[in-house]
Structure formats: C-alpha cells, structure tokens
Amino acid sequence: MRFMFKAGLVLLLLQAAVIQGATIVTNLAAGYENSLFLKPGGSLWGMGYNGYGQLGVGTLNSTNRPEQILATNVFAVACGDQHSLLLKTNGSLWVMGYNGDGELGDGTFNTAVRPKQILASNVTAIACGVFHSLLIKTNGSLWAMGYNGDGELGDGTFNTTNKPEQIVSSGVVAIASRGFHSLFLKSDGSLWGMGYNGDGELGDGTFNTTNRPEQIVPGNVVAMAGGNYHSLFLKSDGSLWAMGYNYFGELGDGTFNSANQPEQIVSSNVVAIACGGYHSLFVKSDGSLWAMGYNGDGELGDGTFSNTNRPEQIVSSGVIAVVAGERHSLFVKSDGCVWGMGADDYGELGDGFNSSAALVEQISPLPRPFLTSGLSSATDLQFAATCQFAGTFYLLTSTNITQPLSQWSPVWTNSVTDRGANNFNATLLNSVSPNVRQRFYILQSK
C-alpha cells in the first residue's frame, strides 16, 4: 500500500425519493474534509475545508455550518480530494476547486473558487477520484480527465490530461472512483475497473495496475463504490461483495487480510453502499445502516473509536442514502434530514463544531432541542436533561456538575459559547479521563 497524502470520495449517483407526497433530494457527497448536499429544489449546500475553493462559494474560507452555493437546478454532486463536480438538471457539468492535475477538465491547471461550466449538456453521471474525474454522457460514453499516473483514466497511457477524453464509447450506466482506481458499470450488469491495484482493489485476482478497462465481474452488478484501496459492489440479489485492502477491517469479512478477488460479505437485502478512506457503509432494505473498518475518528458512528472487521448496525431504520468521506460519513433519513459522524477538523460535519463525533448527529436541518425541566440527577460519569427532540434527546458527558439550569451562569463564563437564540454548546472535561471530551447542546427553558 502506498502512502496517500489526501484522498476524496465520490459516491454513485443517488436519485430522489418521494416521501409523503414531497420530493426529498437525497444526493450528497463527502470529500477529504468537505461535504456537499442538495435540498429540495436543487439548491446546493456545502461545509468543511475550502482551501482550494472546492465548496465553490467564491472564497477560500472553510465553514462548519452548511452554506448555500447555488439556489436551484443542481441534480448531482461529487467530491474528490480537493475538487468538486456538480451536474445540473439540464445536463450541464460544472466544476470547482483544485486543478493542479487537470481534474476540472477546463483545459487549464488553474484553481476555480466558483462553479465553472465545462460541458453545456448531455452529462448524466459524475464521479471523482483523488485527482481525477469521470463522467457519463447520454449516449452511454465514459469520459475522464485529470491525474493518470496509475492508469485510473483508462486511456492506455499514464499521461495526465486537463480536458475530458473519451474512454468507452457506449454502454456505461454508472461510475465510481476513489483513491487512484476507477470502476464503472455497463448496461449488461458487468463491472469494469482500471488504475492502481497494488492491494487488489480491482478484484481481478492480481495486484497489477492497469491503464485499460478490464472486466471484473461479467454480470448482475447493480452498484459499486471505491475506497482508498478497497472496493465494494452490490449484485441484483442484494448481496454485498468486497475486495482490496483490509488492514482496518473495511472489507467486513471478519479478517484483516486483503483480497484480490471479490468475496461475499452479506448474502442479501443490501440496497446501498459507500466506501470511505478506510471504512465502509451499507444500507439494508429495512432502512438499517451498517458499518465496518477504520473508526479512529468515529466515522462508523457507533459511539466508540474502535475498528471493526464485521458489519455493525449503526441505525436501525429510516436510512435511504449514505456516503463516506476520508474520515467522516453522512446519511439521509426518510424525512429528508441529513445526519453525520466522524472527523470534523474543518467543519465537514456542518454541526458548528470542529471536533470528531463518534455518535450520529443531525446536521440539516439543525436540531432544535429545548429543556422542559432542569438538569436531572447526575453521576460521576454522566448527566442528563429532559428534552424534546424528535421524540428522544439525551445529553451525555462526564462531569460532576449538578446545578439546576438557573445556576449555569458561572459555567457559561468558563466553558460554554453562546450560539444565539438561547442556543449554547459546551465542551466539558471528563472527570475520570481528562483527555476525553464530549459535546452537547443545552438550551434555556421554552
């Protein structure tokens, strides 16, 4: 395995879901330290690191709250390492962010801090690798641009290009990319790959890099996702398959052994998949969310920072879409709310904080819990407040504070930051383990 400075993630195109008569757009994407998502009506929102303009807001300023980028007509989004692509409803392709390897495809190597149109029409799907980009046109042709040092563009060379070039002329229906390899799906259900294969992520039985598309699975594949050095795919029977690097258990097979051929992880009922840098997520037909792999930043959302090499249930129901970044994860529930967990160094979770979250938390719309009584009894390891928020809300930390709400003024002075509208957040030291911190919201009585 090679050292990767930074890596982004691009997920498959996610369609809109109709819930209770309202269209909830579920398209979202997670990059290395930034995130993008769509709201109803096609408005584009972003948060997190923006040092290369990948949020497209016209500045290089990062943000830890969702910020609107475009008001309407965005249909799909994709995040690379430090660049982003977006697809509008008219089929036009727009790009922003880092372009040092030509990944924006505009014929230059210049960074773009606002969305810039590359193609005017006929684009149906988009994906990004670390420093390269892929797109599909209405005729089923596959196009690529950007870094090609490992053959990830699949054009038979190892030459970088700053303009889209055609790789496959027809029959391509879906694309996915991550790290330095690319995957695509043809209309006959066959899975194809190209690029870096040093850890078996192409699943062809070798560890040989290839700069030409090669068939991996002959049929029955309906979705795929790529991590830094591993890949997942989903078959029409709902079975989940994995291959590639497995040092952190990201394949979910119960071992830490890499695999250069596909191996079945779950036999049925899987409907959506996502790969992060070194972790994996999937959704079952009952709406449950499952995760495995690296969890050092809480990206699995199980409340710990422990890795796991077996699928672990994180959310029991209601999940309709999921994506994963390098060290954070996002998902959408059936009510259209966006949730997240994991690394938050630059605000990529969009929760207003800049610290990791090991438990899932609602990102959009922002939660509005309120206290219905004072603080309840506390132990040395936790305190709780009776709140109203989506039926259940709990505040957990490690502290000996037992004051009623009316006596929190001294704590506000030392530990709590006013966020406006009677909304406060705090970070309190764990009295047992001083280096462990938990965060929470506390609001004044309604």
Image (cartoon, rainbow, N blue to C red):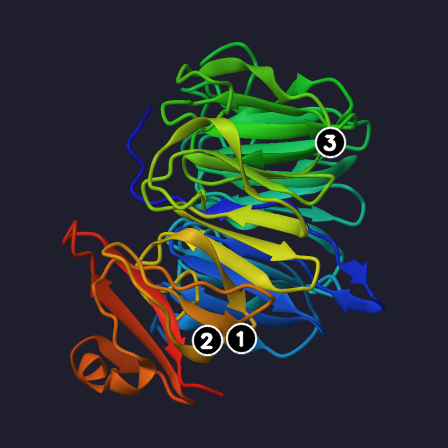
| Quarter of the figure with residue 92 | bottom right
Q: Are marks 2 and 3 in contact (CB under 8 Å)?
A: no
x and y percent of residue 35 in the render? 48, 60
Q: Amino acid at mark 1?
A: Ile
| Front residue (pair 119, 426) | 426
| Quarter of the figure with residue 419 | bottom left
Q: Measure the alpha-carbon separation of dots 2 and 3.
A: 39 Å
Q: Are marks 2 and 1 in contact (CB under 8 Å)?
A: yes
Q: Which residue is found at the position 74% from the left and 24% from the top?
A: 190
Viewer-side label of 2, 3: 3
SS class, disc 1: strand
SS class, disc 2: loop
Q: Mark 1 or 3 closer to N-term?
A: 1
Q: Which residue is found at the position 49% from the left and 56% from the top?
A: 340
Task: Return the residue at label 1.
Answer: 69
Disc assigned to residue 57: 2
SS class, disc 3: loop
Q: Amino acid at mark 3?
A: Asn
Density class for disc 3 (Cα within 10 Å; few <14, some 14-19, many ≥20) is: some
| Front residue (pair 346, 8) | 346
Q: Amino acid at mark 2?
A: Val
Task: Return the residue at label 3.
Answer: 269
Whether residue 113 is visible to the viewer of this picture, yes or no, is no
